[in-house]
Structure formats: C-alpha cells, structure tokens
Image (cartoon, grey):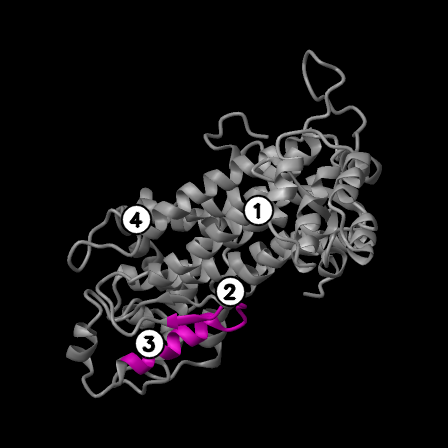
Amino acid sequence: MQSDVLSPLDGRYQAVLAPLRAVCGAAAFARARVRAEAAWLLVLNTLHLPGFAPLSAREKALLEQLPRLSEKDLQILYQIETVGDKKRPATRHDVKAVEYFVADRLAQAGFAARAHWVHFALTSEDINSAAYAQLLSDAVGWVLVPALEKVRKELSARARRAAKQVLLARTHGQPAVPTTFGRELKVFETRLGRQLQQLKKQQISCKAGGAIGAYNAHQAAFPAVNWPQAAQAWVRLLGTGRKNKLFLSPLSTQVDNRDSYAELFDTLRRIHVILLGLSQDMWRYISAGLVKQKTVAGEVGSSTMPQKVNPIDFENAEGNLGLANALLGFFSQKLPLSRLQRDLSDSTVLRNIPVALGHGLLAYTSLLKGLQKTQFDAAAARQELLCHPEALAEAYQTVLRAAGVPNAYEKVKAFTRARAVSAADLEQFVYSLHLDEKTTKKLLALDLCAYVGLSARQAGGKV
C-alpha cells in the first residue's frame, strides 16, 4: 500500500479494485481516447473523401493496435500535455495531446501525410464522449455485472438451502408471523435479479457532430457526405465486442445529453438500495444471534474486547453503498445539465465516475464475503419462534372469519394484544369460544413451525 495516496480506493482497497481500474482507470481512459481517434480515421477511410487516399494495410494495422498503449506511451502522452518538447510546447489540453500523440505515431511509422486528418472536424467532447461511453460499458459489462451476479447466485443458493428453516418475521420490529430464512433471502435475490436485467440492457450514449453537435465543420468541408451516418458507423465500431451497447445521441449540443448516464446511475442506485437493505437485515440477524459468523484465525474484532466478532463486512458494504449512491445521485442530477451549448463544470465530475463505481464494487465484494462467512442458526431461530405463540394470532382470526364467527378479529385482538400468551393459553382461548368441532380441530392443529404459507416454495424460486 502506498503511504501518500489521498483516497482509500487507491490505497487500502487497491487490490480489490484492480479489475475496475483496468477498464476505467486513467490508463484505460487514455486508451479509450486514442481508440476513438483511430476509429474515426478508419471511418473516414470508408467515405471516399477527396484528398484522402485509401488506408494501406499497414496503416490499418497501426490504427488497430495504436490503443494498446504501453507505460512508455502513457508517459509520452502525459508529457505532450504537461511538459512539451523541442518540437512543440505543452498543450495544457488533454484531448489535443491525444491528437498530437496519434499524429506523431503515424509520422513515426512513415505516414506523416495522414497527420492533418487526425481529429478531423471533431471537438474534444466527441472524443471524451466516446471514451466515457467505452469506459462505462466496460465497467458495467465486464466488472460490475459479474460481481453482482456472484452476490445474486450466493443469495439464491443460500435461499434454497434455508428454504424450510423457520424464522420469526418482524414487522415494525415486532414479532409478526413465521417465515423461513430462505424466503427472506429470496426476496432480496429476486429484487436484485430484476434490476440486474435492466443493468445488462442499459445502452450508453455518446455524441459526434463537432462544436455544437450540428456537423458545421463537416458540412463546410464535404457537404455531400452523410455525416450522421458516418458518426453512426464510428459508434458501432467503438461498440464492437462490448456487452452494453453504445448508441449515438441523434441530437446534442457540444456535450452528450447524458440522459443514458442518469438512467445507468439510477439503476445502480436502486441496486444499491436493495443491497443496503440486505446488509442491514443481515446485521440485525447477527445482532439477534440468529446468524452466526465464522471466525477467521488471527482476525481482531476489537482492540479492547477480545471476544468480539463484528459484522464488519456488512458494515463495510453499507458504508460504501451509501458513498456510491451519494455520488451517483449527484451525477444523475448534474451531468445531463449544461448551460446553453457547453459549460465546463462537468469535466471534474465526469472524472469521478470511477470513484462511485469503485465504492459500489467494494460493497459488492464485502457483501459477498460477509454472506460466505455466515451460517443461519436454525435452532436459535426455532427457539425464538416458539417463544412467541402469539404469532399464530393472524391464523386464528382468519380461520375464525372463514368459519363465519362474528367479530373474529376483535376477539383474537382482545386476547393476544400487548400481553404474553402461551400455547396453553391459546388452547384455552379456542375452547372458550365454543366452536363447532371442525373449526376447533382446525385451530388446535395450527403449528407455529408449519405456519409458513408458501415460504419454502418461494425460497426455491417458485412464485
């Protein structure tokens, strides 16, 4: 761990976030920008523009491999922007540095005549938009969705295993009716699965069209070309091989509309709210002694209380989910806004997208780890349930209603509300009602541990 990092994402949690850093870190962003510039040249090659000689096989090969930037390439790119050299001063502009880098590479390969076609009729936001679209698609498709699928599959497996393990459900924190632990996990798995399907289908926009998105420069240079069609081809090329589809915003200002960003971030926020609820419920089950945690040799729970085994993974998940959602909510509100045709207040915000995704990935990892370290204590849960025979009150009043007993709810309420009752008390209550034999037997046959409705079936996925 580096000692001088400002963010724990690049310090304490560096190793956990390596998969995300690979697809949307600073190096990945630089590669995505270079890929966008190279892909535009490949598209220009298809337009038969006057003065644009067809690309040779060597040129095409160079453009296709150009985005595979080495560490040395990244340093050169950074130097063009910040330091400059004898040939030119520092650009102090990151996208212009990318343009010069690509032009230099072409020149070094013997294709200097191509240099003036690099970044032809584009604005910086065309390149940035294409780059961020690539990063978001890769982050979602290759990192976030697989991590969330692991959580979902773990929940599904645990739900099946605990499908018949009874648990006292609580509403408003108070004893309610019996359920099964598997069913309660299945609720979260089902909710997560639905949002995951939406996340997988999420398309991510990008824009083209130059300074204000109207293809002004393009039309001035070559008015006979169908430039929106060319832009579509560019986006298709950049989206090749990606799980989340890229699409071209049909109309935009200088910046992309980014409504698709808000859609994506809001889907992630809904997922995070679901996982937040799961983390808090697991914390509560652990606190109540209904879920046990496996101990890890050498792990310390408290610096002063050696007996402690804290639910740190669920707490870590809760904290990171909150952080992620705070940022994602701001992004959804901020990024679709731009004063008139362009303002620059979005630039630093966009650079923090990987930070929000990083906190999300940390939460998924912690939650999965926490789930894998826990074991439902079926005996403790059963014992707790048996201590609350009043949890059959719902069943009693409903059976009485079905039998046509007047004021059934009120009678059961008067006997059970705000008082401790035993199984024997309930039996005495039944006899005191002087019911017909069939209804009496039906009530006396009710079993706390069997009164779980369709819980076991639902836990297995049959809804």
Measure the alpha-carbon separation of dots 1 and 2.
16 Å
Measure the alpha-carbon separation of dots 3 and 1.
39 Å
Amino acid type shown at disc 1: Leu
Q: Earlier in the sequence, mark 1 or mark 2?
A: 2
Amino acid type shown at disc 2: Gln
Q: Quadrant of residue 52?
A: bottom left
Q: Residues within 10 Å of mark 1 (few under 14, many from 20)?
A: many
Is residue 73 toward the left or the right of residue 51 in the image?
right
Measure the alpha-carbon separation of dots 3 and 2.
27 Å
Query: Which residue is the site of mark 1?
Result: 275
The residue stretch that appears in magenta: 228-247
Which quadrant holds the N terminus?
top right
Amino acid type shown at disc 4: Ser
Query: Which residue is the site of mark 4?
Result: 347
Query: Which residue is the site of mark 3?
Result: 231
Query: Is the C-beta separation of discs 3 and 1 under 8 Å?
Result: no
Q: Earlier in the sequence, mark 3 or mark 2?
A: 2
Residue, far front:
434
Per the rendering, the mark at residue 198 is: 2
Q: Earlier in the sequence, mark 4 or mark 3?
A: 3
